[in-house]
Image (tube, helix red, strand yellow):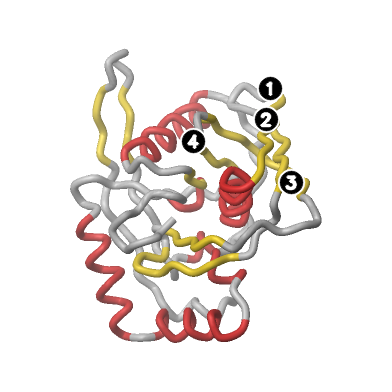
């Protein structure tokens, strides 16, 4: 059990569907908010590769595009599978069943947030370099490798697949402050307000979010 499990507000908004120029029906997915058990559960390895998985990845990519986000993990849209999408500095794609290698040294702390934890952002320590090895929707090998913000995104999204939120990476007084904010009754109103605001444009991302100043 997490120290945050007492906070339970999650989006039940339906997905917003529309047809792209090629005629394919795409869905902008709703997101889950801190307190939803799926965000605290290690996602399952993907073993079935087919149209259902392909649709999931396409919808995640559409959702990420909708909010101009840098990344999106499947548990954030209510699917407990080890999949995330990303778009960083001209690199864009997805990776399934990622396995990480990381440098020993850290990058400069940068403020992170998460649209599954609306209204909160804190500096988080991350490794400078990361390589994610996995597969794509066709079960072909994929490697995503980078430093700085791309490395941060890979680590952030893979954490989601392990049931870890960025606030779990905080230490000391910052972590205590985050705990207090989540337990505060006012936080429930912030989360509920965010859910309502997303009704017109549903989505979840790492790296989007000007709404709360520095939110990732």
Query: Is 74 left, or right, of 204 in this rendering?
Result: right
Residue behind mark 2: 135
Residue under the point 65% across and 59% down: 126
Pointer 2 or 1: first along the chain: 2
Q: From the viewer's side, name the closer residue of 151 and 134.
A: 151
Query: Is 36 left, or right, of 91 in this rendering?
Result: left
As drawn, 101 above or below 54: below
- In three-dimensional space, the C-alpha distance between marks 4 and 1, rounded to whole angstroms, equals 19 Å
Residue behind mark 4: 87
Q: Nearer the viewer, mark 3 or mark 2?
A: 3
- What is the quadrant of the N terminus in the image? bottom right
Q: Nearer the viewer, mark 3 or mark 1?
A: 3
Q: Residues within 10 Å of mark 1 (few under 14, many from 20)?
A: few
- In three-dimensional space, the C-alpha distance between marks 3 and 2, rounded to whole angstroms, equals 13 Å
Residue under the point 43% across and 29% down: 58
Give the numbered dot on residue 209. Answer: none
CB atoms of marks 2 and 1 within 8 Å: yes
SS under mark 3: strand
Pointer 3 or 2: first along the chain: 3
- In three-dimensional space, the C-alpha distance between marks 2 and 4, rounded to whole angstroms, equals 17 Å
Give the numbered dot on residue 100. Answer: 3
As drawn, 142 above or below 117: above
Q: What is the quadrant of residue 83 in the picture?
A: top right
Residue behind mark 1: 140
- In three-dimensional space, the C-alpha distance between marks 3 and 4, rounded to whole angstroms, equals 18 Å
Q: Farthest residue toward the front? A: 108
């Amino acid at each position: 059990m997490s120290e945050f499990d007492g906070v339970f507000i999650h989006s039940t908004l339906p997905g917003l569907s529309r047809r792209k120029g090629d005629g394919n029906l795409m869905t902008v997915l709703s997101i889950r908010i801190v307190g939803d058990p799926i965000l605290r559960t290690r996602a399952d390895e993907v073993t079935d590769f087919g149209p259902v998985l392909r649709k999931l990845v396409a919808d995640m990519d559409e959702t990420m595009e909708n909010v101009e986000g840098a990344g999106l993990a499947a548990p954030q849209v209510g699917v407990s599978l080890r999949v995330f999408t990303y778009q960083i500095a001209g690199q864009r794609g997805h990776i399934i069943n990622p396995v990480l290698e990381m440098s020993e040294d850290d990058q400069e702390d940068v403020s992170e947030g998460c649209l599954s934890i609306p209204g909160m952002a804190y500096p988080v320590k991350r490794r400078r370099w990361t390589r994610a090895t996995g597969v794509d929707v066709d079960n072909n090998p994929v490697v995503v490798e980078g430093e700085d913000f791309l490395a941060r995104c890979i680590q952030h999204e893979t954490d989601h697949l392990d049931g870890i939120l960025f606030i779990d990476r905080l230490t000391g007084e910052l972590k205590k402050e985050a705990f207090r904010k989540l337990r505060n009754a006012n936080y429930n109103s912030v989360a509920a307000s965010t859910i309502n605001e997303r009704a017109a444009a549903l989505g979840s991302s790492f790296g989007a979010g000007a709404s709360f100043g520095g939110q990732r």
